[in-house]
Amino acid sequence: MELHLLDRGRIQADLNFALDGEVVAVRSDRSPELQYDEYAVWNLVVDHPEATILWDTGSHPDAGDGYWPAPAFEAFAHVDAAERDLETALDEVGYTVDDIDAVVQSHLHLDHAGGLYHFESTGVPIFVHRREIEHAYLSAKTPEGGTAYLPDDFDRDLNWEVVHGERQLLPGIELLELPGHTPGLLGAHIRRDDAEDLLIAGDVAFLAPNYEEGREMGSSIVHDSRAWAESRRKLRDIERHTGATVLYGHDLDQVERLQGTL
């Protein structure tokens, strides 16, 4: 089984979104300088003997040209979405969209589901958790729910495969329920005979400190903080028992370190 990490570019945003209360005013410094950082966007190709799987589809290439609502782009600016489109990233590791046999959507936020249009009317199965697709439609079609779901990303002729609980996707690949960041976040435990296991934590941990130190993400990007804490504990238990490498959601240092080494 081969794993290929796809570099889908950089999002720029306030560090307080990733690490809650990282920069706050205090009596002696009532106007602290905010920290505006860069974060990674990645996808993953899992080349399994039985199928080639794509994990997430990233941002739409027109994110910065009006496809994303202006407030969303102001808060989370995917500055190179057009240059780091899915086809380009796949080509860099020797694949095309046509090589993909199935897609797993960890969740349906706009920086993870923007490439689903590539699979419209193709019959390629798109795996998504039931709670996630329900929440995505609720959010996109009503005033309820979250603001990071765009109907143009997922309200398409797609071959949805709805995940109702933890399940084996293929031998050696187990999908994990990891609610918190969103109601139906999916992760994965990938077991390999010739390399370390990989735990896809994704947006359970925007950055390493969310996972390693239990630092919460900003409240505006956490749907349920108690569920998030439990999902983190679940991943920590698996890591302790297996020694797996844990892959975070947007940690630029980790993505640059792991590029070409998985």
Image (cartoon, rainbow, N blue to C red):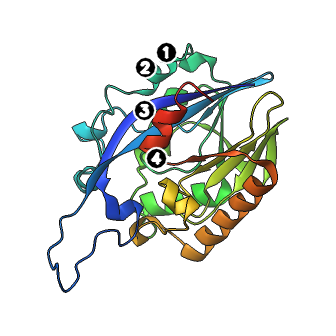
What residue is disc 3 on?
Answer: 8
Residue placed furthest toward the left: 31
Closest to the observer: 100 or 174? 174
Three-letter amino acid code of the residue under disc 2: Thr
Q: Which mark is residue 88?
A: 2
* Type of amino acid under label 1: Asp
Task: Report x, y in % for residue 124.
Answer: 65, 29
Assess disc 3: are there few (<14), some (14-19) or many (≥20) residues with their C-alpha within 10 Å of its C-alpha: many
Mark linked to residue 251: 4
Q: Which of marks 3 and 4 is in front?
A: 4
Q: Do the residues labelled 1 and 2 touch (CB within 8 Å)?
A: yes
Task: Please tell me whether residue 23 is drawn above or below residue 47 in the rendered image.
Answer: below
Inter-mark Cα distance, 1 to 4? 23 Å
Let me know if residue 113 appears in the view: no
Residue 153, given in percent of the width and then of the height, sits at 45, 42
- Residue occupying the far bottom of the picture: 27
